[in-house]
Amino acid sequence: MESRADGLSPAPLPASRGRAGLRAEVRLLRERVAALERAHRARRELLNQLTRALTATTDPDEVARQILAALGHLLPGSSAGLWRWVKEEGLFRAVASVGFRDPPGGGRLAFEPGEGLVGAAAATGEPVLVPDLLADPRLQNRAWVQS
């Protein structure tokens, strides 16, 4: 069977051996269904909380923070950042991030166009997906990511 991204991959069922084997299979299936239902309810409640939070604010930076906080719960172990173009400064400034600690020693939170991963995203107008962040030569805040 396929492995699932949510970590709820099905375990192999025991070989049927009469009624006892069938009962064991049914019990395992019920446990799996219950686990999937609990995970679904938790995700739905998180998305409901996010919806309530998003309708309570009109501040775009707060919306970004709320979305990334939810992302951290929905996709554990993921990391992401949202940056805003500040026309007056000619810089991209960090608005929100998830999966990173605060930058040690005040890491760079602003980038010029074309600089680093932020600049790459701005140049293409597409999100930058990086499977191995530390191996990407465009990474600017290496010490921050390693912390």
Image: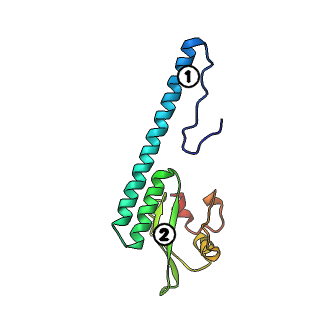
Residue 61 in picture, x, y percent from top left:
41, 71
The foreground one among 79 and 30 is 30
The residue at 45%/52% (across/down) is 73
Give the structural element (helix, strand or loop) at label 2. loop
Mark 2 is surrounded, within 10 Å at the Cα level, by few (under 14), some (14 to 19) or many (20 or more) other residues, namely: some
Foreground tag (2 vs 1): 1
Q: Visible in this render: residue 46?
A: yes
* Amino acid type at image mark 2: Gly
The residue at 38%/64% (across/down) is 54
**Hey, which residue is sitting farthest left in the picture?**
56
Q: Visible in this render: residue 108?
A: no
Q: How many marks?
A: 2
Label 2 or label 1, whichever comes before in sequence order: 1
The foreground one among 28 and 142 is 28
Residue 47 in picture, x, y percent from top left:
42, 54
Relative vertical location of residue 12 with respect to residue 62 in this rendering, above or below: above
The residue at 54%/58% (across/down) is 146
The residue at 53%/23% (across/down) is 26
Residue 78 in picture, x, y percent from top left:
53, 54
Give the structural element (helix, strand or loop) at label 1. helix
**Hey, which residue is sitting farthest bottom in the picture?**
88
Relative vertical location of residue 129 with respect to residue 22 in this rendering, above or below: below
| Apparent side of residue 18 relative to residue 32 in the rendered image (left or right) | right
Q: Label for residue 25?
A: 1
Q: Label for residue 107?
A: 2
* Amino acid type at image mark 1: Glu
**In the figure, residue 58 lies in which quadrant?**
bottom left
